[in-house]
Image: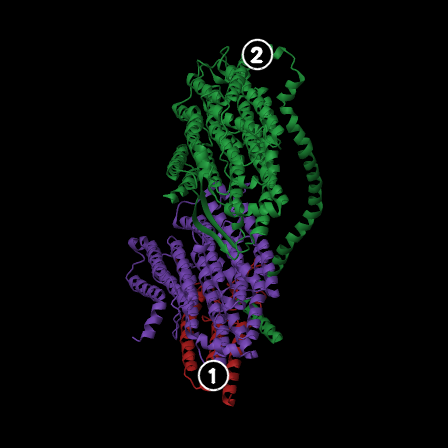
Chain colours: A red, B green, C purple
């Protein structure tokens, strides 16, 4: 195995790990999906490294396939981000935790906060802080959900 | 054409399913008799056509439908076996069932459980015909339990009545007791066949009849004791189902069920399954003389005992029930006669002969008793009615025909079959080993015949002659039964009158059944002794006269006289039920209460603790399910790390 | 067209046909006016057409390709797994589209059914996959339409949340799977599954095992193995009933087919088989035990069914592990999967019959005394539940029996122990299924009837059909 292959593989593994950690720690929907893209990029790098190591094109082809599927996923993800944002006026993923085991009745986090004079657009949600203890600073004028 | 035999069990099964669907749907329940009757008619027609096509004899055919299970060494094919014996019994079952089903459509009219009744009775016919047709002892056992279940459900048909529920339970438990022995026999036999045939490839096929009969000579040579045990175990199973002493206690109580059920299941078909089992296993029994001796003694005792008790019963259906027990005793007695050299084949023929004629006339008697019951507003106590001859003229004639057949006066059916059993016993009386035993049985058989004549004529005269009176429940004007109830009785009457003489003179039965595979056939045919004929006719006539005197005595005279000890004893069925209760049931209940206490306080609390454990753990770990995507992803990452660690540690 | 391409095309012909139909749906749907009364009336038509087409296709498949041809091309292969997988998927497809006749979302009728068809096609492609590329694309072909189905079939907050959870975690699992796949590619230098298997037959490095662990972790998400199962209860709760039923069956079928495809190649290296088997066994035991334990603590039908399906995945994983040791004989796993599909869909259809709309989430207490109101439905439901327990007279018995027997036949201590634990788990599972039955047959104390008395509907019929299949299967195990 050539040093170049080894280094490329290292890059791939790092990208994957960064993506993984990002997925776990971020609370913003867009960042979460970006983290997944990062993981996929790491995988694609791996494929390309192996492909060039063996001198065959199938690795590169696979990488292109992965990018294609990733773009499909991105399309769905962005559509979903819009749909979710319309409901709760925030991109904080922790607010979508109504479906769970309900043994001890906790007070549910609320999306609406009393301070509604803030910006029109979403701001980056801080990572790793429980929304139960902090007020969510963002909100938009409530957009009514489309009637089914 | 032979594959059409599958229609015999399947048509009633479909009928039963349709009835159940009607119950489910909750509509058109009043039409439930149609699928039942049509199903049974198909079965009866197919059975009779196959009978005439087969010409009997060496006619052994197995038709295999499909292999239910084929896993490794377990291969369970479901196949039917046709031979003279199964076809003969099959025809009795299907024909009587059809008649009873038609009768029931009139008898059960207006009952809230109308559809349930027909669903159950169809299911019974399915189980019974499968019992007769299957070619494997294990499957026979399965359907043996199946008919037991149907019998239980039908005895307890009016389950709101405590007595009916109790009787059903009793029948089921007593049968269960005997079935345990039967099952032990099946398992022992399975083991034994495995010993001699050395066939390890297919463990279930060891219980095919062919395999059993092939193994019997080898077993008799190598393990005679084992064979003796198997014979006795199977005999116990048979006497349980056929209500022989000491297992007879369930049958009289079974009369709590609707009368057609008593006629079909508890007189004509199911209780004869024991006889069928012995006939089926006759090649085995020929090597197990102990079982045959036991069968003969139990049969003789039951025949007399049943007769005596029947004499002192005042309930018409119970008289008939004890009469059934007594007549079944005759059939077992016939098997006892098979003890002699190579006469088991003749014994089988005699027993089956009596089985057929008995099925006809006993079904007829029960159904006419049902007519009486119907007219009397469900009162069946003979002390409360009498002189019904002019009120129920047709029923009277039908009952009379059945009674004559039962008493054994020529030329009606019962005479010929009873004669063949007694003749067989007499012809064996100079047997060097068992001669005295045969003489003894012959005497008991004659005594039973006398008793039969007495109680039958007593019941007849008490019901239809003498002073005309009926209970208040019957209303002002008791009326004759409807056509639906009378028509099948006339058909049955043809069998009651002619079946005996036809079978006797054309000697069809022996030719049909006898060339049974694996059974040595006796070629000598016993000759009718005119002395015996005269003797039994005179006994019958004497019995009838005594019975007439007993039946026409004034009720007042009867009650005024202080009953002697024997009468009390017999009226209470010799206290056999009480004996069984104190001997078996009470200690079991006591033991059960002790075990129950232990179970409740020790086992249960342990079990409850263990059972609560999973839920407690579940309640703890489910809280990890917090509803947050990041937690879920973290869970997955922990899983991945755990898997990687596992792999790392392993390598 | 080259002969190889033609053959490869024939193998997956059902999937291609289904995919074609889905495209036609999308094209025709463009001209459908959802707001007009005729459009609204035609909503259930899509389901009827789907059911009919899938049934025809299924019968056709059974009719024409009774024997696998054994052909292996670059992309697809035709063997018994492919054949069984195709039948299994079509069976599930017929049942699910019949189920959704009355539960099709009005605004998205044709999209709904097109998505359903596409994911069925994906599952069939997956069954025949012979290459990592086709395998990966098939998995995505199942998972992306599932996301869309979740999103369009239920439009309230719960539906949104379920979509989010499924999609995000599914993308995550896909990435993990791909990472493992990239190492497999690196080990063998080829993307063909047989090439990878050949490489693994001689290669027993740690990298191979790491790759396998990652691939299995990614696929464990599809088959809801613990601890990759977290999404399942939430998604079951937050979706409409037919979609929940679909998620309980089709992705699981796809996941198991993928595992079988990756592990079921030629003779693998013994050391490698040991580690893969260990992974599967540990996953299986954890999955069935925690699935059953958590199901015991549930009070809602949907969550209970979700955990029950988790537990069943555990039993299936035991079967896969046994198959791995026994050289890739996966008949029992596939027959368990088909039995599981039938009985689970039966239970879901019964729930759909009982609830007015597909979104409601009945609690266990709501069905108390149901027998008084709907005896027929109750009996069919009971048959399905008994089959999930695995009692005789139902298909579930043979299914469990087969897996159990397979595990015992490997004659390996760990698998025999696994089989015993599986039996104990089946008993624990019987506890909650039986308590469900008890509730159904018990006379309620109050007269309140929160669940409507069912009228006859396609889902009613479906429950009865599923129950009938379950019983028939028991009677004719060799025909299935």
Identify the residue under disc 2. Answer: B555
**Image coordinates for residue C432, horizontal then vertical, percent:** 57, 52
- Classify 10 Å Cα crowding around label 2: few (below 14), some (14-19), many (20 and above): few
B12 and C55: which is toward the camera: B12
Asked whether the residues under marks 2 and 1 belong to the same chain, the reply is no
Viewer can see residue A140: no
Mark 1 falls within which chain?
A
Mark 2 vs mark 1, foreground winner is 2
Question: Residue at the left extreme?
Answer: C31
Q: Quadrant of the C terminus of chain B?
A: bottom right
Q: Secondary structure at mark 1?
A: helix
Distance (Cα) linking label 2 and label 1: 111 Å
Q: Quadrant of the N terminus of chain B?
A: top left
Mark 2 falls within which chain?
B
B166 and A29: which is toward the camera: B166
C400 in relation to B300, above or below:
below
Viewer can see residue C293: yes
C458 and B411: which is toward the camera: B411
**Image coordinates for residue B247, horizontal then vertical, percent:** 60, 32
**Image coordinates for residue C397, horizontal then vertical, percent:** 52, 53
Question: Residue at the bottom extreme?
Answer: A3
**Image coordinates for residue C418, horizontal then vertical, percent:** 59, 62
Residue C423: mark in rendering: none
Name the quadrant containing residue C422: bottom right
Residue B451 left/right relative to B87: right
Q: Secondary structure at mark 2?
A: helix
Identify the residue under disc 1. Answer: A50
- Classify 10 Å Cα crowding around label 1: few (below 14), some (14-19), many (20 and above): many
């Amino acid at each position: 195995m050539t040093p170049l292959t080894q280094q490329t593989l290292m890059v791939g593994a790092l990208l994957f790990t960064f993506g993984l950690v990002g997925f776990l720690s971020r609370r913003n929907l867009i960042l979460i999906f970006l983290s997944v893209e990062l993981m996929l990029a790491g995988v694609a790098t791996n494929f390309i490294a192996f492909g060039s190591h063996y001198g065959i094109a199938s690795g590169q082809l696979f990488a292109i396939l992965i990018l294609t599927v990733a773009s499909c996923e991105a399309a769905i993800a962005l559509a979903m981000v819009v749909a979710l944002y319309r409901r709760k006026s925030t991109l904080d993923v922790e607010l979508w935790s109504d479906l769970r085991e309900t043994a001890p009745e906790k007070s549910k986090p609320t999306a609406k906060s009393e301070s509604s004079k803030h910006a029109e657009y979403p701001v980056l949600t801080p990572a790793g802080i429980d929304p139960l203890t902090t007020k969510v600073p963002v909100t938009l004028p409530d957009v009514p959900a489309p009637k089914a | 054409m032979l594959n059409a035999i599958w229609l015999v069990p399947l048509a009633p099964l479909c009928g039963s399913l349709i009835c159940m669907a009607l119950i489910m749907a909750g509509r058109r329940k009043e039409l439930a008799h149609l699928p039942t009757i049509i199903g049974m008619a198909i079965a009866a027609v197919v059975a009779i056509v196959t009978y005439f096509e087969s010409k009997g004899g060496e006619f052994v055919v197995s038709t295999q439908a499909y292999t239910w299970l084929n896993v490794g060494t377990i291969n369970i094919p479901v196949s039917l076996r046709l031979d003279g014996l199964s076809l003969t019994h099959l025809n009795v079952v299907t024909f009587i069932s059809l008649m009873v089903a038609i009768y029931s459509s009139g008898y059960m009219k207006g009952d809230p459980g109308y559809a349930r009744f027909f669903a159950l009775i169809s299911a019974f016919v399915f189980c019974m015909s499968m019992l007769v047709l299957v070619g494997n002892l294990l499957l026979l056992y399965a359907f043996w339990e199946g008919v037991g279940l149907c019998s239980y459900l039908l005895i307890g048909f009016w389950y709101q009545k405590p007595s009916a529920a109790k009787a059903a339970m009793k029948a089921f438990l007593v049968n269960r007791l005997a079935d345990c022995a039967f099952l032990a026999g099946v398992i022992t036999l399975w083991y034994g066949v495995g010993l001699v045939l050395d066939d390890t490839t297919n463990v279930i096929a060891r219980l095919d009849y062919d395999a059993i009969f092939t193994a019997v000579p080898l077993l008799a040579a190598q393990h005679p004791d084992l064979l003796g045990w198997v014979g006795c175990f199977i005999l116990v199973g048979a006497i349980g189902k056929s209500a022989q002493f000491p297992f007879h206690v369930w049958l009289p109580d079974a009369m709590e069920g609707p009368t057609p059920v008593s006629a079909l299941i508890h007189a004509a078909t199911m209780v004869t399954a024991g006889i069928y089992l012995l006939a089926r296993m006759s090649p085995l029994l020929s090597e197990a003389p102990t079982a045959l001796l036991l069968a003969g003694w139990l049969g003789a005792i039951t025949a007399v005992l049943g007769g005596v008790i029947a004499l002192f019963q005042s309930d018409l259906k119970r008289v008939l029930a004890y009469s059934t027990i007594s007549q079944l005793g005759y059939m077992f007695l016939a098997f006892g006669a098979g003890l002699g050299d190579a006469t088991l084949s003749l014994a089988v023929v005699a027993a089956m002969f009596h089985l057929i004629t008995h099925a006809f006339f006993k079904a007829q008697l029960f159904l006419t008793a049902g007519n009486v019951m119907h007219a009397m507003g469900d009162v069946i106590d003979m002390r409360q009615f009498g002189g019904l001859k002019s009120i129920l003229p047709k029923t009277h004639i039908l009952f009379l025909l059945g009674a004559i057949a039962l008493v054994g006066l020529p030329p009606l059916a019962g005479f010929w079959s009873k004669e063949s059993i007694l003749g067989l016993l007499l012809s064996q009386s100079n047997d060097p080993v068992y001669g005295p035993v045969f003489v003894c049985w012959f005497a008991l058989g004659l005594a039973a015949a006398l008793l039969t004549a007495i109680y039958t004529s007593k019941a007849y005269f008490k019901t239809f002659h003498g002073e005309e009176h009926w209970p208040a429940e019957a209303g002002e004007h008791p009326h004759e039964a409807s056509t639906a109830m009378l028509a099948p009785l006339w058909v049955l009457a043809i069998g009651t009158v002619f079946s005996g003489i036809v079978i006797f003179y054309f000697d069809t039965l022996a030719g049909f059944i006898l060339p049974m595979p694996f059974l040595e056939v006796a070629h000598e045919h016993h000759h009718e002794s005119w002395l015996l004929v005269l003797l039994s006719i005179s006994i019958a006539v004497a019995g009838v006269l005594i019975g007439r005197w007993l039946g026409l005595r004034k009720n007042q005279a009867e009650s005024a006289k202080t009953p002697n000890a024997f009468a009390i004893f017999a009226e209470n069925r010799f206290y056999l039920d009480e004996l069984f209760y104190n001997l078996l049931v009470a200690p079991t209940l006591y033991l059960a209460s002790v075990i129950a206490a232990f179970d409740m306080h020790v086992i249960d609390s342990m079990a409850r603790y263990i059972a609560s454990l999973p839920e407690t753990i579940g309640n703890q770990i489910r809280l990890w399910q917090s509803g947050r995507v990041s937690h879920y992803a973290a869970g997955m990452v922990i899983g991945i790390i755990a898997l990687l660690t596992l792999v790392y540690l392993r390598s | 067209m080259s002969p190889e391409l033609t053959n490869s095309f024939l193998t997956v012909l059902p999937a291609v046909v289904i995919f074609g139909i889905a495209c036609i749906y999308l094209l025709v749907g463009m001209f459908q006016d959802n707001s007009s009364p005729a459009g609204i009336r035609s909503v259930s038509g899509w389901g009827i057409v789907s059911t009919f087409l899938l049934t025809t296709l299924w019968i056709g498949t059974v009719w024409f390709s009774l024997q696998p041809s054994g052909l292996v091309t670059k992309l697809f292969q035709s063997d018994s797994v492919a054949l069984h997988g195709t039948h299994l998927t079509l069976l599930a497809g017929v049942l699910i589209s019949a189920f959704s006749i009355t539960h099709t979302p009005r605004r998205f009728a044709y999209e709904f059914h097109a998505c359903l068809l596409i994911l069925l096609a994906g599952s069939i492609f997956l069954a025949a996959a012979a290459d990592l590329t086709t395998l990966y694309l098939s998995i995505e072909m199942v998972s992306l339409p599932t996301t869309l189905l979740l999103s369009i079939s239920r439009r309230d907050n719960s539906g949104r949340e379920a979509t989010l959870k499924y999609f995000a975690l599914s993308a995550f699992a896909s990435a993990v799977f791909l990472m493992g796949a990239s190492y497999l590619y690196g080990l063998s230098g080829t993307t063909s599954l047989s090439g990878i298997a050949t490489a693994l037959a001689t290669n027993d490095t740690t990298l191979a095992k790491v790759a396998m662990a990652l691939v299995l972790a990614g696929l464990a998400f599809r088959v809801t193995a613990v601890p990759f199962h977290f999404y399942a209860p939430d998604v079951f709760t937050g979706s409409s009933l037919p979609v929940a039923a679909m998620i309980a069956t089709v992705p699981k079928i796809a996941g198991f087919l993928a595992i079988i495809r990756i592990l079921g190649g030629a003779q693998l290296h013994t050391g490698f088989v040991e580690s893969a088997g260990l992974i599967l066994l540990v996953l299986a035991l954890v999955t069935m035990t925690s699935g059953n334990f958590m199901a015991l603590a549930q009070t809602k039908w949907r969550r209970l069914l979700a955990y029950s399906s988790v537990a069943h995945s555990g039993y299936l994983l035991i079967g896969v592990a046994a198959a791995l040791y026994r050289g890739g004989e996966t008949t029992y796993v596939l027959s368990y999967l088909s039995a599981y599909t039938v009985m689970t869909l039966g239970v879901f259809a019964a729930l759909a019959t009982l609830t007015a709309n597909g979104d409601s989430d009945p609690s266990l207490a709501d069905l108390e005394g149901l027998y008084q109101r709907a005896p027929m439905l109750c009996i069919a439901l009971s048959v399905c539940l008994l089959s999930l327990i695995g009692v005789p007279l139902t298909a579930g018995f043979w299914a469990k029996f087969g897996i159990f027997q397979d595990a015992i036949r490997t004659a390996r201590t760990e698998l025999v122990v696994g089989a015993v634990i599986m039996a104990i788990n089946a008993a624990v599972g019987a506890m909650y299924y039986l308590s469900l039955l008890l509730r159904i047959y018990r006379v309620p104390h109050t007269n309140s009837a929160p669940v409507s008395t069912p009228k006859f509907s396609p889902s009613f019929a479906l429950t009865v059909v599923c129950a009938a299949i379950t019983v028939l299967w028991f009677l004719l195990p060799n025909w299935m």
